[in-house]
Amino acid sequence: MSDFFDKAEQLSAWLPSIEGEPKIAIDTEADSLHCYFEKLCLIQITAAGRDVLIDPLAGFSLEPLFAALTGKELIFHGADYDLRLLRRVGFAGPTRIFDTMIAARLCGVTEFSLAALIESHFGLKLTKASQKANWAKRPLSGEMTDYAVKDTQYLHRLADIFTAHLQGLQRWEWFEQSCEKAIRVTEVLKEKDNPDAWRISGSGTLRGLSAAVLRELWKWRDDEARAADRPAFHVLHNEQLLYAAGRLAQGQPVEFHHLRGSRLRRFQEAAHRAVHLPESEWPVFVRNPRPRPTREDEDRVGVWKKKRDKVAADLSIDPSLIAPRAVLEALVLNPDEGRTRLLPWQAGLLGL
């Protein structure tokens, strides 16, 4: 049974119970699948043998909660998204985390989703029915609260299991360094308004007018999504944008049956504006200033890859945990930069 806090008094009455708790299991839910302006909709916490759901939409200050979390180790499963959400609403961030996803991967676990870990260690199969639910709606259904609670209910036990595994494998320092990095990367908030955001997956081959059309249609879609406070894919999917850009650039008609009324009119205006853009206003593709690898460079990257893969195979972990390909290329093209992108344990495994 969980407690749902939608009043400041409830939160204040509960906070003293976690004062002496060194570790707090925490997770969050947002409504990014249902709106443009993503909101933190729920904070789940398991601590001192109690499961608590806190409602950030109820309007009371979360500062007392954030103050209570200061100095404690926070247990997450995949901390990046949750920490970014919490920072956005005023959380200064933890000094120490235990990320069970990182721990599982460093132990060589290949199925490392929370559901997979819970099923593997506790024999419980979690339902995914609420995975895409609208967490901004109130009241939450019983199914949703049950789903939310289970996101933190098992984290303490998983942390204990993986602490033993990591120490047994002598990988505890690797884990600590990786968790410290996970905290640092969330200190930089991702930009929502990126001028190149229109360069969606699949657009790399578009040039000239078709690229110009895609850019204009993307801007139209973004404006529509903002105005309606709905995710962009509710207006038009990326595949549909690419399809429309290709056809319109060739002078062919495009029709989407779900576009009607004023939205259809604005789409048509954007399409007309796009196909009549002068060439001087088409997107300019600037070549990447990074030096392109020569054949000799590629061979050297291959040597690093072979070394990395052998080390990973010996340790039974994913090679990308040691160094993704981009880092291997950096080690060849810009060794100093490449080394700065490696944690000490990763550099050590590569002999650096």
Image (spheres, rainbow, N blue to C red):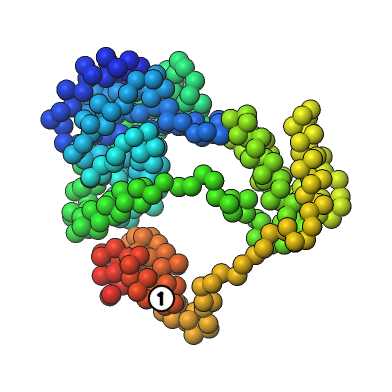
Write the residue at 42% across / 31% down: 40
Q: Nearer the viewer, residue 182 or 287?
A: 287
Q: Nearer the viewer, residue 101 or 221?
A: 221
Write the residue at 80% across / 34% down: 265
- Relative vertical location of residue 300 with respect to residue 13 in this rendering, above or below: below
Write the residue at 55% across / 30% down: 34
- Using residue 77 as the reference point, say whether residue 167 is left or right of it: left
Query: Can you tell which quarter of the image residue 53 is in?
Result: top left
Q: Secondary structure at mark 1?
A: loop
Where is residue 229 drawn, in percent x and y? 58, 30
Query: Can you tell which quarter of the image residue 231 is in?
Result: top right
Where is residue 161 drawn, in percent x and y? 23, 44
As drawn, which residue projects farthest toward the left?
A: 20
Where is residue 218 drawn, in percent x and y? 67, 46
Write the residue at 39% across / 19% down: 58
Query: Can you tell which quarter of the image residue 348 is in?
Result: bottom left
Q: Which residue has dot 1 on it?
A: 334
Where is residue 130 drawn, in percent x and y? 48, 28
Image quadrant occupied by the C terminus: bottom left
- Relative vertical location of residue 237 with respect to residue 176 in this rendering, above or below: above
